[in-house]
Amino acid sequence: MNQCKLTTARVAALKPRRRDYVVRDLEVPGFGVRVYPNGRKLFFAQTQNRVQNRGRRRQKSFGHFPALSLIEARRMARAFVAPINAPEPTPLPKLFEDVGETLLHRYARNWKPSTHASSRRYYDQFILPFFSETPIAEIDERMVRRWFASLGNRPGQANRALPVLSVLMAQAEAYGYRPPNSNPCKGIPRYKMAPKERFLSADELARLGAALRAYPEPSAAAYIHLLVLTGCRKGELAGLRWTDYRHGRLYLTDSKTGAKTVYLSAPARGVLDGLPRTGARVFDIQVNPHWKSIRAEAGLDGVRLHDLRHTYASHALAVGEHILTIGKLLGHRDPETTFKYAHLADAHVQKTACSVSAAIAKGM
């Protein structure tokens, strides 16, 4: 195979051989002339682009010399080769809204359905409006701090939205939309919030008990009674099946923190044993409307169902249970979650210390 700068005179001077051969042009890469044994001379161009053409070679014939001039054939070759060999255009940066939805959907398998639903709400309401039209790779710590500060009048929502954004940033790294180890949410402190834990006093528990006994829907009353006696989450009882109740325990296969065993006291077993077994599920009700009625009857305005779980923990501390044991009872995966009740233990110790001191002082 020969290679030279083709001219009209050189093309005209090419002689046929026993087999066809090619002479390539030095001026236009891939352009050349093929000379056949019968003397025909065909202009052609050949090119290859690994990205656009998956590595396959492309070739195009333009016509025979001298019917097609060298000048015209070279012009046609340039037009054929140029767009194929042009550098691949730099892709536009991925905007946050273009990938955020996909990343949220992909991560959903790591969340409970309720967690995914709430994370989606925070994404739609608090995250997407701020970061829309921003390349996801350009979101930095300063931008995240501005966003977090913009939610300062809603600190609770901000604190819940920050982990959702952090998950999206981590997923963006995993799928190549951001550089590794570039999560801009790391190290940003959350807003300090006043504790929301509400614990029922002995008098409030007595009023709740009276309201439960008088409530006309026994299944709803049993549901709430069992929340108080076990410290279970509302969702754990919502999916409870009769087959989960055996040997005096509840064997939950899918609680918030995974499989969990709930050890039942005699009063708790009594609540379950008093219910009719009319279906596979223990409770087939929506408890929230019933709780509003029961709460109003007991004079417990503002008390949430989750506060019954806090009440269980506070009474466990009051009778002297170790805080880590209480964490196991409540099904906490992280001990730090249980330590938020430590101030209750301190209050119990202080109360005991005052009682002991008062008794000693009285005898002196």
Image: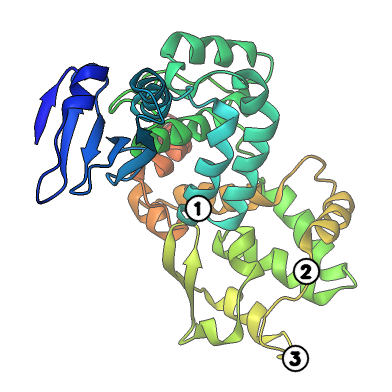
* Residue type marked 3: Thr
Quadrant of the drawing holding the N terminus: top left
**Circle number at residue 111:** 1
Q: Secondary structure at mark 1?
A: loop
Measuring from the top left, give residue 334's x and y in whole percent: 36, 46
Disc 2 or 3, which lies upstream in sequence?
Answer: 2
Question: Between 297 and 319, which is closer to the camera in this rendering?
Answer: 297
- Residue at 61%, 19% (x, y): give it: 133
Q: Quadrant of residue 48?
A: top left
- Residue at 22%, 26% (x, y): give it: 11
Badge 3 local density, few (<14 within 10 Å), some, or many (20+)? Answer: few
* Residue type marked 1: Trp
Would residue 25 be found to the left or right of residue 79 on screen? left
Disc 1 or 3, which lies upstream in sequence?
Answer: 1
User: Given contact means CB atoms under 8 Å apart, are the residues at marks 2 and 3 in contact?
Assistant: no
Judged by depth in the image, the label closer to the viewer, 2 or 1, is: 1
Question: Between 1 and 221, which is closer to the camera in this rendering?
Answer: 1
Disc 2 or 1, which lies upstream in sequence?
Answer: 1
Badge 2 local density, few (<14 within 10 Å), some, or many (20+)? Answer: many
Q: Is residue 270 visible?
A: yes
Q: Secondary structure at mark 2?
A: helix
**Circle number at residue 278:** 3
Identify the residue position indicated by label 2 in the image.
221
Measuring from the top left, give residue 244's x and y in whole percent: 52, 82
- Residue at 62%, 61% (x, y): give it: 235
